[in-house]
Amino acid sequence: MTQGTDRTALTSLTAVQLLDGYRTGAFGPVAVARATLERAQEIQPEVNAFVRLFPDQALEQAAASEERWRRGEPHGLLDGVPVTVKDILLLRGAPTLRGSRTVDPAGRWDEDAPSVARLREHGAVFLGKTTTPEFGWKAVTDSPLSGITCNPYDPARTAGGSSGGAAAAVALGAGPLALGTDGGGSVRIPAAFCGIFALKPTYGRVPLYPASAFGTLAHVGPMTRDAADAALLMDVISGPDSRDWSALAPAPGSFREGLDGGVRGLRVAYSPSLGGQVAVAPEVAAAVRRAVERLAALGAYVEETDPDFSEPADAFHTLWFAGAARVVQHLTREQRGLLDPGLLEICATGARRSALDYLAAVDVRMDLGRRMGRFHDTYDLLVTPTVPRTAFEAGVEVPKGSGHRRWTGWTPFTYPFNLTQQPAATVPVGTDTAGLPIGVQLVAARHADALVLRTAHALYASGTA
């Protein structure tokens, strides 16, 4: 094994590159785990990406992996690769507190979530649990339990949410792979703000257990440094799990197959502002347009057009707020006093919605899904900005002076595709004049996850991302 590989070099590598290094003996999992843990500890005081780290456990897992690689018997697709897990997902042996002081740390904690179980089976090294807003309820990451998670590019600004800790960790070299959850944009928003890649897969493609109180809005998705790593991670976490009754059948093939297929001949719809419904910051609009022009230069047929829907905020709010009310329904009056005040507000709103209100929102959702299905009869991909602006000040739900009441006001490009359950990814496409990252969103028809990954990979290969 080559000596002298410095920590910075190791923590800047993708998962694919780490596995190549293990395979050739250039370095081993123990050195990588040690370097990544040191990096996580170094960034924690400034960005607050972690709820807890597992240094002893991670080094033990890395040592076992290193021995397997020494014998030429790696265990699965991710043997020895460091990963982080959002503190919404169960990880055996560690509390999952979900950003809340109302969750008892002294629980049994003897079960892995499906995606975590698949990672364990494939030899991944668990670095720690990453931060989330309370119960993942909003698109920024601050909570009564763990405080504010800050942006890697400017600690005075938000990392986004609700998978903000995961995004900050990947962006700053504290593990190349992260598991996040996305109920309205929660992997895509922080990935866009932090300059990394994230995919919200088709609903059911990655099994989820326990079921989310937010129902079929909630997805589990990879957060990575590029699309190739996300495809590798998807090959692992999309494995079946009988605990999720709504999970899809196994994927027909590897998500890594066809990544290099390019975009020539794809029919791309470019919607810069959802038909003028969204005010997009000029620098964001320009960066997204350049990415679309690059797709055209790579051989895609691009047309500027808009999907056939009005912003479905009211329907989403009914479903989301009712889910939040369900999350806290069992809490005592004293426990409710410990909750994030904004969460309390939406729970009160959700509790007032009737079953008929909920079913009316489901009707809106089904109609939106039908219209997007027809839209994709014509277009393979829809391209939009991921978020209409770059990261704003940390510690607030909405940008000051924006006039928005709730986080959905500044995330109009993301949450509609949780309603429709379509795969959607964000790809970094530059920065604004303040040095803050900008993301472009790629959306495809349900089950076309491989197409989204292939298109994103083409942007990375072309140097656009």
Image (tube, rainbow, N blue to C red):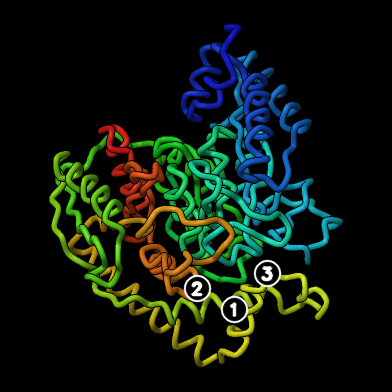
Q: Closer to the camera, 436 or 102? A: 436
Is 90 located above or below residue 122 in the figure? below
Label 3 – label 1 distance at C-alpha: 10 Å
In three-dimensional space, the C-alpha distance between marks 1 and 2, rounded to whole angstroms, equals 9 Å
Query: Residue placed farthest to the right in the image?
Result: 106
- Residue 240's x, y, as percent? 55, 51
Separation of residues labelled 2 and 3 (CA atoms): 14 Å
Say what secondary structure mark 3 lies in. Answer: loop
Which residue type does callout 1 highlight?
A: Ile
Q: Nearer the viewer, residue 402 or 329?
A: 402
Q: Residue at x 59, y 30 (%)?
A: 81
Residue type marked 2: Arg
Q: Tell me what residue is drawn at x 36 percent, y 61 percent.
A: 446
In the rendered structure, which disc, 2 or 3, sits on the residue that comes first in sequence?
Answer: 3
Between residue 44 and residue 203, name the one nearer to us.
Answer: 44
Pointer 2 local density, CA inside 10 Å: few below 14, some 14–19, many at least 20 = some
Find residue 346 and name its label.
1
Report the disc number at residue 406.
2
Amino acid under disc 3: Asp
**Label disc, if present, on residue 362 of the rendered structure:** none
Give how far across and how far down residue 441 sits, in percent. Answer: 34, 53
- The residue shown at (54%, 35%) is 172
Q: In front of the other: label 1 or label 2?
A: 2
Q: Which residue is mark 3?
A: 340
At x 23% / y 61%, what residue is drawn? 271
